[in-house]
Image (cartoon, rainbow, N blue to C red):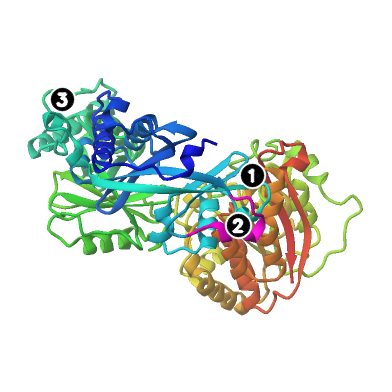
Amino acid sequence: MNKTMNTAPVFSEAQKEAILNSAGKKVALTIARYEHTIEKEDLAGAGETPVYGVFVSLKRFRQLRACCGFMGESVRLAHALDQAAHRAAVDDIRFPVIENHEINEMEMEVWVLFSPELIGAEGEARKDFVEIGKHGLLVVQGEHRGLLLPSVATEMKLTPETFLEQTCLKAHLPKDAWKNEKALVFRFQGMVFSKALKDTVPEELAPQVLVAPKGPSRGDMARLADHCYRNIGKQYENMIPDPYLPGAFDGNVNGACLRVRLSTISADCAQIYLNRPQPLQSTLLGLSQNAAMAMRQHNLKPAELQKTALCVFWDAQPLGNVEKADLSSIDTRHSGILAIRFGKWILGYAPGKKAELILEDVLKNSKFESDEATQIFSVRVACTDIAFMTSTVQKPMVRSTPRPAAVAGLFYPAQSDVMERMRDGFFSPDGVEKQDFAGALVPHAGWKYSGKLTARTLEQMRLASRILVFAPKHHALGVDWGVCPAPRWNLPGRPMEGDENMSRALAEAVPRFQLDSLAHDREHSIEVILPFLSKLAPGSHVIGAVMQGGDRYLAESAKQLAEWIASLPQRPSLIASSDMNHYASLEDTLRIDQPVIEAMRALDPEEMLKIVRENKVSMCGVLPCAFMMMTLRELGLLNRCVTVGHTTSADAGGETKSVVGYCGMLFC
């Protein structure tokens, strides 16, 4: 390691100003798609200074907009600054693409890093070598790398231990990985300079770089809405549409909604491009095609088409999650509020209305949770209506038809004879004595990996005539907590009966749940378990529910479920479906899963949930598992745990570098 990096570089005021101006010019020109390179001559004699690295951070309205860096064992300042500034301008994929006009409103920080040191201590002693406010941290383990600048610890009011934990989480490692001898922990120091980004743009370049945000005018919107109306009619009749309206706006936008009004109904066709804005007119062509297809599918005639409304939005700016969103910068005369959660989104636009009230309406109409998973953005809006609200949040869909097998042939065999032979081979050859277990945890991966553990767990359970299965929801379709209303679960071979009345009663007993077929259409986490239940309890009925988000409602909902179960003439069996940690190495997976399993063995669902959340364990069914355990506890049936097994995908001949963990447990 270069010894010249072990002391803080000394910069004159002129050099600091040159560093800021050079970085800002590089950022601004890169955003504006101009080629530019920072040369050593631009830095007033500081260009050849060896440094550990440089980070460039951009903030807009006090919210982080981008932060990227360039590091090496010993790099020239000019080169590191050039690379970091370029990456901050275009490479931070966590955020939407930065547009030219944002340069007017962004603050820039430039961090120059120096004095890297490997902390040679082991275990807990490593925290004694971290000084808050002075050191930044880098944790490296295998392919995992996480770096936090010195300012993070002071801004978040961290201790040395929590600073180390947050750095591990940044590296997608368990929060206590810094104690592991295989993890390398480096500390470094840094100095920071800051300036308004627009003040770094040379005067002669300002007209090309500092431009106002662009969107369609009122005249454009009226013409484009009529253009879509005509194209819907043409596409309905399978005629060639007009792909482009000459003279109308066709800049890049973050999204659009085409509202189709017919004599009996009104429907929205919408598209969003949060991170990669797309040309407006090609977006509208696709939306008009979708509208024409939907009209044909529902036997609606073009003569019924009365009017189309159009809403276009651009300049998406992150404001934080719903708990911390800063709405003070929103001018609601021109901007709306966009909320996104688990791939679903809703846009609210009400000119002149207080931003807080618009957000309140957005959350009410979407039923999004007010937690960190709901992200809030401001967007510039152009609209043919006075106000507008559109959403991809589906309303519950209830179909009284059998739920078809959706993943047969993917997670398990589609041919009934092949499926039965494979399934039957997983059970204990001599059978086992069944016991009165009240609940079970089983995995839901492909049978090749988890079928044996599922069979060996469920075969020990004396199953009731009604079985409640709680599982994670892996996709955005449908409501977050959805009960399947189907009267039957179709499978290769013997189907499993549902119970429409009991499904409805479950949704009424626990208001958080809603009857929704759509939430189950593509979901595998219940289906892969059903053939095992079909063999073990062929006369039983399965009531399935999927869950996504809503940690804060678990305890209350578990009490409601327990009260309902206690009122039934016969107690149903409860099953939770979940895999354990995903896609870490075999060694890491076993280590990551262990404290979660220990919390389950200790019959402590709150501790299990806390471990999963704090350590970012990718246990997909942690909510269903915690929900089942809390319900059993309310019923006085969470007194003993039997661990059937803890396996991984590597046990089935899979690779060891990226594995998934599985656990089978029984509770009574």
Residue identified by numbered label 3: 245
Q: Point out residue 334 in the picture as x, y percentages from the top left corner.
A: 14, 49
Quadrant of residue 50 in the image?
top left
Residue identified by numbered label 1: 584
Q: Point out residue 598 in the picture as x, y percentages from the top left corner.
A: 71, 64
| Secondary structure found at label 3 | loop
- Identity of the residue drawn at 56% across and 72% down: 558
| Span of residues in magenta | 119-131
- Left or right of 301 in this view: 583: right
Q: Is residue 308 visible?
A: no
- Left or right of 298 in this view: 342: right
Badge 1: few (under 14), some or many (20 or more) residues near its Cα, within 10 Å?
some
Q: Which mark is residue 275?
A: none
Relative to residue 181, is residue 52 depicted above or below? above
Q: Which mark is residue 126?
A: 2
Q: Amino acid at mark 3?
A: Leu
Q: Amino acid at mark 2?
A: Arg
- Left or right of 232 in this view: 91: right
| Secondary structure found at label 1 | strand
Q: CA distance from mark 3 to mark 2?
A: 64 Å
Q: In the rendered structure, does residue 124 fall within the stretch colored magenta?
A: yes
Front disc: 3 or 2:
2
Q: CA distance from mark 2 to mark 1?
A: 24 Å
Q: Are marks 2 and 1 in contact (CB under 8 Å)?
A: no
Q: In the rendered structure, does residue 589 fall within the stretch colored magenta?
A: no
Q: Is residue 292 visible?
A: yes
Which residue sits furthest left?
Answer: 219
